Image (cartoon, grey):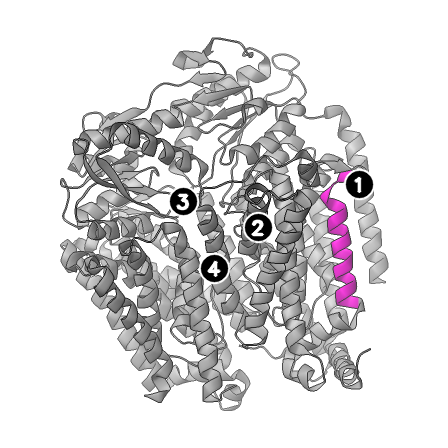
Amino acid sequence: MAGTGETKVLHEYRQAMTVLGKSLRLRHESILLLILAAEWLFFAAAGRNFTTLDNTFNILRHSVEIGLLALAMTAVVLTGGIDLSVGSLLGLCAVLFGTFWRDAHLPVWAAMLLTLGAGAAAGGFNGTLIAWLRLPPLIVTLGTFSLFRGLAEAMTRGVDTFTDFPASFLFLGQERWLGLPAQAPIFVCFAGAMWLLVHCTTFGRSLRAIGFSPEGARYAGIPVRSRVVAVYLLAGLTAAMAAIIYTARLGQAKADAGVGYELFAITGVVLGGVSIFGGVGSVHGTLLGVAAIAVLNNGLAHVRQPREVAGMLTGLLLLLALSGSEFLKRLATRRDRCQPSPAATEKA
Amino acid sequence: MKAYSREVSVALTLGGLLLGLAIFAPSFYQAQPLLSLAAREAPTLVAACGMALVILCRQIDISIGAQFSVCSVCAGLLAGAHWPIPLVLSASITIGASLGALNGSLVAGLGLPSIVVTLATMVTWREGLRWLRQGIWVDLPEGFQWFGLRQSAGQWTIIILALTVLVLLALFMKHLAAGRFIYAVGSDAEAARLAGIRPRRITFAVFVFAGALVGLAAMMNVAQSPQVDPNSGTGLELKTIAAVVVGGVAISGGRGNLWGVFAGLLLLACLGPALTHLHVQAYWEKAIQGSVILLAVVADGGHRRNQGSP
Amino acid sequence: MNRILTSFVFAGLAILAGCGKSADSSTGSGQAVLGPGAKKITIAFLPKSKGNAYFISCMKGADRAARELGVELIFDGPTDPDPARQNEIVENWITLGVDAIAAACENREGISTALRKARAKGIKVITYDADALPDVREFFVNQATPQGIGYALMDEAARLCQSEGEFAVIIGSLTAANQVEWRKYVEERRAAQYPKMIMVAVRPCDDLKDKAQSEATTLLSTYPNLKLFLSTTSLGVPSAAEAVKQAGKAGRVKVIGLGLPSENRRYVKEGVTDSVILWKTEDLGYLAVQAAFAAASGALKPGDKTFKAGRLGEFQIQGDNIMLGKPFIFNKDNIDQFDF
């Protein structure tokens, strides 16, 4: 049960958000929804076979790993932090999973559990450095970005590949279960759990408070350190889960799995309206952001555009979405004629 | 001296590494390879100075790698069109500055977070360059390499150029008002604004300047071989941010100086060749590099706590 | 209000998706060609990665074949090294409904997952440059086996060093599957035939020219008795050559490797690089597309012993490998005849 201090800080926070225009955040997600719908309609008209069920499942299957990372990243970014190491951790966990299964001869489920544990431990390592030693998240995760990838390469000497997984395991990434891709229920459950965690629990609300003002949250009695360690631990756990699904989808595990995934995840998160400074954002926004990027990438392939164009348009989309959101925020603030709270002042 | 204690500790670590190499791998100390190494890393030093300014201003620029690639390819193409070297140099700097100006206008003008803006511009330019060039190398004309000088003269020119930039910038940051303004904006933009400094202008100018430095660095790199690789900027942002952070510049801005960045860059640049000379297998390199960054950050955190600053 | 809007849009999208499926089910992917002029055949050409001059030249050959045959050619490939990208591209092509895929496989087992699905949908699969698992493709256009390439590299290295001395290897990246294989065969040949040649170091260059040059410079100073650089990545050869040249050791330290004539012409002419080994990459692309077309139209079937590929003439088929020929050695005498 939350203490009185915690409730008061959160109450004031809510008031401040209302002044800023809570509707602004919702407006960002509405815009995103319109963008998504516009993309879909455009590609349905211009592309060939874009709206088939097969393709929709493809979009889903291709974006599960990045979606998982983006969801975990949402919680991290809400606290005002960032985790650049999730892609490298995915690679490390994939290699660990392969090692547990092939070299330690463990059954698949045991290897999975150990991998999840390892991912959580790595995430906890990040979180401890950030929360207990008060180090900047950007740099700590930049260091672990190299370290985790380096450990994966060292373990395999770069060259080792793990393959020939049992068919029952590959089912997870490649086959259909009750008509949907097998990883879909996992993703939906995880997304649902994440949504509940961030939006309906005091844990989730405390994350926003920490992002909004770590000192204020601490004075209000929120156990900031353990919450921060918890979100990074969750990010690590999610990276491990994503690694398992990735390995099942591909049928092989290598040290370079997940290269560049952290940037895709951050792009999805930011596109979804989560403020990189912390305190503002939602899980459904992130999901919409990831969906918008996934549909864009897939749709462009169906109108025969090369992948570079998809990359460029993703970058432009991000800029447009951010600029548009900022313009609306300025308009709303001017319209409300309210004194903007300190959080609104640019941190330039 | 206490004010420089962080930089001194980096320098001591570097000294330790060099000493270790002298004992265990004396083959490291040969004139020509060291000269080549210094000339190779000189462009990175110039780019790292630009990144240091951006970080001191409490921003970040992860698009400098893409900027570097774009400037390199443009310089190469212009050289191929037989433009004279000084014009190619000015063009490269101008292009870098314009790319920086785009970043700066979005960050300072619209108040968007720099990490996201530069992420978006990085992706756009990188993919755009790939789309246009398809990874094909640009051949440079004869007489362009080393700015038309002999190899050793060219290498020394590049090294001295980089060191000049470093020294001038370090003095600028310490003694000129504009330099102090950067520190002020990085420490507390609101207080700086109330003191009469204009944070948005400073931020914009810093991005433009960093872009110009990247253009210069690109030119320095292009002059070192007869072909330009469009992927040459890959990983530059990681290298420069690591050098800046290891060198004691705070990622939250307002603290640190360029001498530390110099020491940090030397440390990280020597790490790769040191591992080769010590016969360490190549697949350990990333893990060791990551550990060095983490150690530097932990040391930084511990140092700050001892000094009692927040 | 917003929640209602959200659920409405999601419901709408779901309905659209469902409708789309039933509307398009009559034009499923991989339908057989009805006859000349009925529908243009689409062939999808997958390189290992984009932005790679080697695959650009393969593409030129592929383009020529496509124009001669009157087929539509789609060229797309991964722009980042993540292994999953090739799979995603292939899966998009499956839904797009291409008739044949010609693929250079970065990860043998990984991409086989996607190619298997393509085959199940009736799409013909040809591999070139690097093979997938044999059960997922009709034929593999073999320019030279990894063994052939590895042995040729080692033989050439030994020839230049009189079968003894130290040499260093520069590779593109630690994880690239083909480079791993080539290195394996180089080592195999060395151990079997040239035990007096010592491989002192293997350094990756992350597919960056500048890094390759730095690594080469460092290796030159670490191993003063180094006699030769061997590079399995095409950008390693000119970079090592430049490093040797800048160190003033041109002629004393030899440079060989896999490389494109265009990137190495300068150094071969100057005598810094002795020779580069490759094959006619344009012909490889041409042959791959010809084979893909023939497979899609039924002209090429499993069990065929020869294959006639347009202008290039007849090629031998060994089992399920269409043999392009042997690796070709480009040196001072012949490098001017090629422009790729």
Residue bearing mark 3 = C173
Find residue B17 and report its horizontal and vertical position in percent.
29, 67
Find residue C107 and report its horizontal and vertical position in percent.
51, 36
Q: Chain of mark 1?
A: C
Task: Kindly report the distance in space between the C-alpha atoms of the residues bearing marks 3 and 2.
Answer: 29 Å
Mark 3 or mark 2: which is in front?
3
Q: Residues within 10 Å of mark 3 (few under 14, many from 20)?
A: many
Task: Kindly report the distance in space between the C-alpha atoms of the residues bearing marks 3 and 1.
Answer: 44 Å
Q: Are marks 2 and 1 on the same chain?
A: no
Measured along the vertical axis of the image, is residue C309 above or below residue B216?
A: above
Residue type at mark 2 is: Leu
Question: Which residues are drawn in magenta?
Answer: A180-199
Proximity of marks 3 and 1: CB atoms separated by less than 8 Å = no
Considering only order in the chain, which callout, 1 or 3, is on the residue closer to the N terminus?
1
Q: Chain of mark 3?
A: C
Q: Are marks 3 and 2 on the same chain?
A: no
Proximity of marks 3 and 2: CB atoms separated by less than 8 Å = no
Residue bearing mark 2 = A313
- Main SS of residues in magenta: helix
Question: In this rendering, does residue A321 appear at all?
Answer: no
